[in-house]
Image (spheres, rainbow, N blue to C red):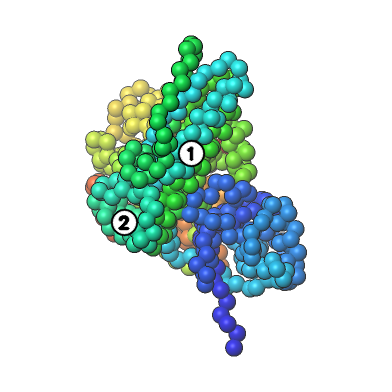
Amino acid sequence: MDSPKRKVYVSRNLRKHFLQIEEPTGYIAGWNTGAETFCMAISASPEFFLPGLDVIGLFCVSNEEFILENEVVELYKKNIDLLKFEYENPLVLIVHKRKEEDSSVKITAKLITNCYGTSEDMEVEDLSYNPAVLLRASGQLPLLFEVSSDVDTLKENIAHSIERLRTTIQNEVAAFFLQNSSVIIHSSYDQAMMESSMTCKELLKLCQDEDVAEKVLKARKNLKRKCPVNFHIFIQTSGNAAVENTVNHSVIIHCQRREFQCVSIPLPLDVLVVAHEFSSTYAIYKLFISAVDKQLEKMNHCLLNYAENLDYITPVPYHFYPDIWDFPVTVIYPLSKEDAELEKYRRHLHKLLLLPLDRPFLKKLNAYNFCDSLSTGYLINPHEGLGASGNGNTALVQGRYSYHHYMQDRMNDDGWGCAYRSLQTIISWFKFQGYTDKNVPTHTEIQQALVDIGDKPPSFVGSKKWIGSQEVSFCLDHLINVNSKIMCVSSGAELANKGRELFNHFRDQGTPVMIGGGVLAHTILGVDFNKSTGDLKFLILDPHYTGSEDLNVILNKGWCGWKTMQFWDQSAFYNLCLPQRPEDL
């Protein structure tokens, strides 16, 4: 009897990422439990994988639907040289891109035995749960170095100062304080303590912020963007770790009398690591130490790059979390440099991270705020709490947006402001995706924009008059320089013929769509389209909601949910505004 195949779990986001890449090969990161392998991320370079995500193999894109075993081994040998791959018995994912309209990938998994040059079939399954936990540690370390007018000397001084900080971290003098608790994770050289250290799951239970703990567990189960468990970074000045790294002899003071100038730069450390429920606190400590050391090394590179101009910049970590990733990545940018000045570097990063070159995934404006809903006062992506839509092919809004609806912002617009709210949701999408740095406009600012372009008379400002899809497109063009397509249907029933066109919009553009008909306006966030039967469902975000930001009420009462064709007035005329993404990096 044949033994069961080992299983390989591939996340849904990874499948989406495979659809967008053009590179023929790259690294795969995840983890291996022996019987199961979890594939969670891909990249052309392993340097941006978070600590806790291990390189477990490589992927190869194949144009062939089927591939023979000897061809797999040859494909592997060809690509290990390209990637300088030096891992024993790696996993190889063969990615077959299908050219169908619904765009999908077929994945074949093989385990390569380097010693014998053979491959073993593995069973590929979609990942239905994510056992990982995202942990975050932040703090500040002072960087002090002597200034010099000689560039080489200045670089040497900076590098030496960074190296001192790295040595401090590597000596395990750092400690990590769990936010909203009394727990401190620090180094221990006691073997018994290491073996008895609590697990990550037990650690979460000690977090006094029940809301954060609930979000962490819910995100893990639902495969949504992860909310991290937060720690603060401290440097120990007492205890075994601090004492053991103190030089054991009398103090010797060397005094040199000369004039010199020093610069002190506070380095804002902010690291992310991936752990698992049953990871020990000792393992978590090691991950944090590795992450801080790695971040200091990258900050050193950033500082040295700008030392050429004697420019003392502050290197700052920014976290980015595109919706095709299961885990974020961290990039170091100089604080004083604008996005326009960093375009060349971003292009390089896009290639390393296998990201499209026509969308601004890594602008500073795109930096991910793990507390968006708390900081903005609006719900972010409420549709992510919904279940599956049906049996068709689904295309959804790509990226983040905030939900704008009646009665927000101390504005009583009940009965007339639905299209204004839909426009606000659309503009929030463009802001979150880094296409604009402008704030979401108020009703008055929207009205003033229409007056400024000559579409409305001055008396329109301050009124309670409706706007429609055409006015929404005018505002998008005038306020944030975004073009739109207008789709017209003579009746709600005619929307049934627009399934393919709407599906293509969400697949290719991924922007929210405003639809207005009769006296109502709504925001469409996606469609479920069965191309065989023509059945069509719409994912609707309803701006007519007047309650508080209660996600359960909004989802359970259908203010955000899937609607059938019967949702629309079958006899009303409808206009749809389909915003188009600008090509940008």
Would you call the spot at circle 1 few (<14 residues within 10 Å), some (14-19), or many (20 or more)? Answer: few
- Viewer-side label of 1, 2: 1
**Residue at the spot x=48%, y=54% of the render?**
52
Q: Looking at the image, is mark 1 or mark 2 earlier in the sequence?
A: 1
Is residue 470 at all visible to an observer of this figure? Answer: no
Which label is found at residue 267?
none
| Residue at 33% over, 32% down | 443
Query: Distance between the Cα atoms at labels 1 and 2?
Result: 28 Å
Residue 110 as seen in the image, left or right of residue 404: right
Q: Secondary structure at mark 2?
A: helix
Number of labelled discs?
2
Tell me the amino acid under the disc marked 2. Answer: Leu
Check disc 1 and report the residue beneath it: 167
Question: In the rendered image, which residue does mark 2 sit on?
Answer: 203
Query: Where the N terminus falls, by quadrant?
Result: bottom right
Residue 253, position as x, y percentages in the image: 43, 23
Quadrant in which residue 300 is drawn: top right
Amino acid on which the number 1 mark rests in the picture = Thr
